[in-house]
């Protein structure tokens, strides 16, 4: 019995301590046990059972549209999806759609490309203003106003590209040395000038490139095809 009375005193002491601490937080006009400083409904009628926000569950202040447990009056994200894990503000907890380290609720750029460097706000940094974010930019010092490729490097019209081609010999006509057969090719792509520099010699006579010919193909095949035709016979 002494042990039980001792427990009773201890429990009673804890209860009194808790009430004293709560009362010390400030005045409580409606005497619902929630200090005015924390009470969203500071004029609750006497005797009304209230929640931790000091509101009766039937009042408009207690309306919780998204059912996340945070009343709309205190909910910064009133449209939270069902079963979402939320923080104290009623917002999904640290959701980061683009994985840039800045949560969506504080990210004005929630769709930053993967791998892009971002600032403190979560927006991509583009040091040279070429439209390609740092981290994805292979040339971060592109001159201002210079057109850039998808990798962020300046477009240089003098760039040359070697392309392997297959030469199809004509089935009719007088045989001519392959070096004298002009190439019949599609027009060059817009903005590109084909080179007339003789290409290197091929491994076999049938694959011998056309010396001095224009090699230009927009074929999507793995090996573009250049069709040759006999040169006019010398008169």
Image (cartoon, rainbow, N blue to C red):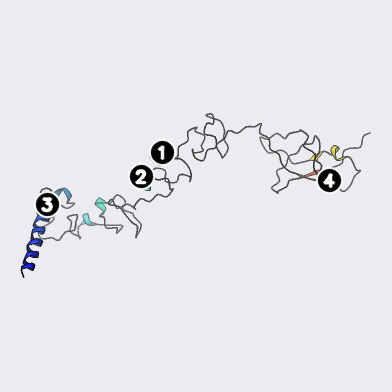
For label 1, the SS is: loop
Give the number of the mark in front: 3 or 1. Answer: 3
Mark seen at residue 227: none
> 10 Å neighbourhood of mark 2: few (<14), some, or many (≥20)?
some
Residue named by callout 2 = 106
> 10 Å neighbourhood of mark 4: few (<14), some, or many (≥20)?
few
Q: Nearer the viewer, residue 134 or 56?
A: 134
Residue named by callout 4 = 206
User: Are the residues at dot 4 and dot 1 in contact (C-beta closer than 8 Å)?
Assistant: no
Looking at the image, is 24 positioned above or below residue 45? above
Residue named by callout 3 = 21
For label 4, the SS is: helix
Residue 183 in picture, x, y percent from top left: 80, 40
Q: Residue at x 21, y 54 (%)?
A: 61
Q: CA distance from mark 2 to mark 3?
A: 35 Å
Q: CA distance from mark 3 to mark 4?
A: 97 Å
Residue named by callout 1 = 119
**Which is more N-terminal, label 1 or label 4?**
1
Q: Is residue 31 visible?
A: no
């Amino acid at each position: 019995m002494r042990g039980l009375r001792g427990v009773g005193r201890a429990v009673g002491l804890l209860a009194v301590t808790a009430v004293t601490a709560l009362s010390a937080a400030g005045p409580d006009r409606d005497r619902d046990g929630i200090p005015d400083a924390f009470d969203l409904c500071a004029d609750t009628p006497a005797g009304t059972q209230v929640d931790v926000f000091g509101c009766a569950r039937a009042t408009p202040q207690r309306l919780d549209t998204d059912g996340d447990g945070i009343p709309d009056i205190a909910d910064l994200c009133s449209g939270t999806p069902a079963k979402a894990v939320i923080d104290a503000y009623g917002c999904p907890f640290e959701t980061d759609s683009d994985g840039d380290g800045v949560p969506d609720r504080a990210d004005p750029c929630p769709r930053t490309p993967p791998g892009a460097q971002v600032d403190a706000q979560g927006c991509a940094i583009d040091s040279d203003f070429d439209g390609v974010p740092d981290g994805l930019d292979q040339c971060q010092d592109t001159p201002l106003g210079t057109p850039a490729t998808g990798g962020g490097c300046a477009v240089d019209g003098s760039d040359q590209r070697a392309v392997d081609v297959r030469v199809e010999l004509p089935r009719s006509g007088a045989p001519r040395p392959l070096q004298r057969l002009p190439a019949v090719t599609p027009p060059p792509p817009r903005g590109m000038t084909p080179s007339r520099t003789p290409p290197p010699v091929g491994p076999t006579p049938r694959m011998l490139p056309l010396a001095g010919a224009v090699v230009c193909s927009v074929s999507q095949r793995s090996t573009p095809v250049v069709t040759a035709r006999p040169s006019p016979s010398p008169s």
